[in-house]
Amino acid sequence: MENTPNRPGRGKPRDEGLRQAILKASAELLLEGGYRGFTIEGVAARAGASKVTIYKWWPSKGSLALDGYVEAVSEAIGFPVTDSPRRDVETQLAAVIHGLTSTPSGRAIVELIGAAQEDPELQRELTLRYIQPRRELAATAFARLLGWDAHKRRDELYAVTDQVYGAIYNRLLFGLLPLDAGFASQLVEFWISPSGRR
């Protein structure tokens, strides 16, 4: 799983099989009941782990829920790389929109974002381990799409991707429509059209 922290443990070395069981249980519980119904006790029971072990490896409920979320969605919203940068970006944006609107992961991320507003540590980890790494991947994908140098124009690429994904989350959070694959195509068309970038 990408971006899962390798925090130094106290005592015995981490049991990788148990760690995977905890992550799987975390992902399942988060998607089943959302963040509000997510508990360390529930994860421990499902994974066959002790709460003490979980707290050795994850400092908080938010940290564990975040890792569960990343475990659940990373593969589904990955960036494809083919000979068509436009198709790659549209496919990825459509996958994100589908996940947010048609799967339990949509509710989970909205609740995680909401919880992060009152939990500075969760907000920091959400940005560090999920938002920023995906921002980097998106910048690279949009560099291919726009024919820009990914290193020299990094700040400009961040501005582009922040606008694109910001538009998606704005529609999600406020229930604005349409929010579908057609909207993904519209966003891409805007950025590759000369008139859109004037």
Image (cartoon, rainbow, N blue to C red):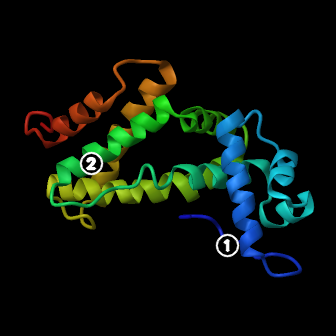
Residue type, label 1: Asn
Front-most of 25 and 70? 25
The x and y percentages for residue 21 are: 73, 61
Label 2 residue SS: helix
Relative to 188, does residue 58 appear above or below in the rendering?
below
Is 96 on the left-hand or right-hand side of 18? Answer: left
Q: Which mark is residue 53?
A: none
**Percent of width and height locating residue 60:** 79, 53
Can residue 116 be seen in the rendering of this structure?
Answer: no
Q: SS for tag 1?
A: loop
Q: Nearer the viewer, residue 97 or 194?
A: 97
Q: In percent of the image, x 26 and y 61: which residue is there?
A: 81
Amino acid type, callout 2: Val
Neighbour tally class for label 1: few under 14, some 14-19, many 20 plus, Cα within 10 Å: few
For image coordinates 18% across by 40% down, the residue present is 191
Side of 85 relative to 75 (left or right): left
Q: Could you say which quadrant of the image residue 190 lies in?
A: top left
Q: Is residue 81 left or right of residue 105?
A: left
- Mark 2–mark 1 Cα distance, whole angstroms, equals 30 Å
Q: Which residue is denoted by mark 2 in the rendering? A: 89
The quarter of the picture where the N terminus appears is bottom right
Q: Quadrant of the C terminus?
A: top left
Q: Is residue 198 above or below residue 77?
A: above
- Residue 37 in picture, x, y percent from top left: 77, 34
Q: Residue at x 41, y 35 (%)?
A: 98
Query: Would you name the residue on which mark 1 appears?
Result: 6
